[in-house]
Amino acid sequence: MATSVSSLELLLSSPGKTESFGYAIGQMLRGGEVLALIGELGAGKTALVRGIAAGLGVAADSVTSPTFMLVHEYQGRLPVIHIDLYRLQRPEEAELIGLTDYLADDVAVAIEWADRFPQLLPDDRLEVRLAHRTRRTRGAQLEARGSRSRSLLARIKKILRPTPRSSQPILQPARKASPR
Ligand SMILES: Nc1ncnc2c1ncn2[C@@H]1O[C@H](COP(=O)(O)OP(=O)(O)OP(=O)(O)O)[C@@H](O)[C@H]1O
Ligand SMILES: [Mg+2]
């Protein structure tokens, strides 16, 4: 996938890098954003949410996999709603737990296994695809669908960019930028 205004590709070279990336995302959230997390078992979806929550000021150890709960809520600078659709059998069950009620302007929502029920997702969402590369590395592909998500992605890119004072970016991009 080519990196464009509405997409970003990164290599996350350790679990800590995944959490740092989540942290950067968390810092950039303003409320009303939905992160659709997609990737196989152990791809790092929960690790990313742990970072996102930390970036919003939530204590790191309060974030666990909501596999048996379906929904967790953490209180940070914004409330974070952490949803896991892995065990959901039918979309009607999501209605029963009021999933759509969570999609509000003043909360941040992160949904693991979002691709299981794409019909439940809002049109405006930041899709984050995580994939195993090696035992310790993961690839991340972000794609913004909608204006709110594009604006979030732009802020994320800005925070990842190295400043003149620090020669190292927070994370290395997945592919080399073309020479200027
Ligand atoms: N670069 C990496 N980023 C994130 N996790 C990594 C990385 N390298 C190794 N790991 C390991 O992969 C596992 C990721 O677990 P995590 O629970 O975050 O995955 P998940 O996508 O939420 O899985 P599930 O589908 O079961 O919910 C952890 O054990 C973590 O230590
Ligand atoms: Mg998980």
Image: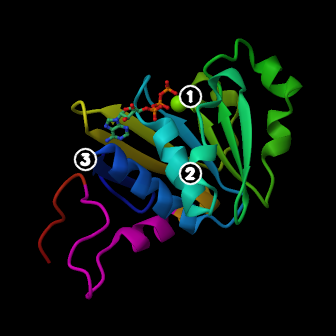
Of 58 and 144, nearer the camera is 58
Residue 159 placement, left or right of 134:
right
Q: Which residue is mark 1?
A: 113
Instruction: Give the number of callouts.
Output: 3
Quarter assignment of residue 97? top right
Which residue is drawn at the image coordinates 41% and 56% (left, top)? Answer: 21
The vertical placement of 16 against 85, above or below, is below
Quarter assignment of residue 56? bottom right
Q: Secondary structure at mark 2?
A: helix
Q: Which residue is mark 3?
A: 13
Mark 1: is the Cβ under 8 angstroms from ligand 1?
Answer: yes
Q: Which residue is mark 2?
A: 60
- Indicate which disc, 1 or 3, sits on the residue closer to the N terminus: 3
Residue 119 placement, left or right of 166:
right
Q: Label 2 vs label 3: CA separation?
A: 20 Å
Q: Amino acid at mark 3?
A: Ser
Q: Secondary structure at mark 1?
A: loop
Q: Amino acid at mark 2?
A: Ala
Residue 36 placement, left or right of 4:
right
Can you give x and y, in whole percent of width and height, for residue 32 in the image?
72, 58
- Indicate which disc, 2 or 3, sits on the residue closer to the N terminus: 3
Magenta span: chief secondary structure: loop
Specify start and end residues of the magenta stretch as a single range: 153-173
Q: Nearer the viewer, mark 1 or mark 3?
A: 3
Figure quadrant of the C terminus: bottom left
Which residue is drawn at the image coordinates 78% and 47% (left, top)? Answer: 103
Q: Label 1 vs label 3: CA separation?
A: 22 Å
Q: Was residue 163 drawn as part of the magenta stretch in this picture? A: yes
Can you give x and y, in whole percent of width and height, for residue 41 in the image?
44, 22
Mark 3: is the Cβ under 8 angstroms from ligand 1?
Answer: yes
Q: Secondary structure at mark 3?
A: loop
Q: Amino acid at mark 1?
A: Trp
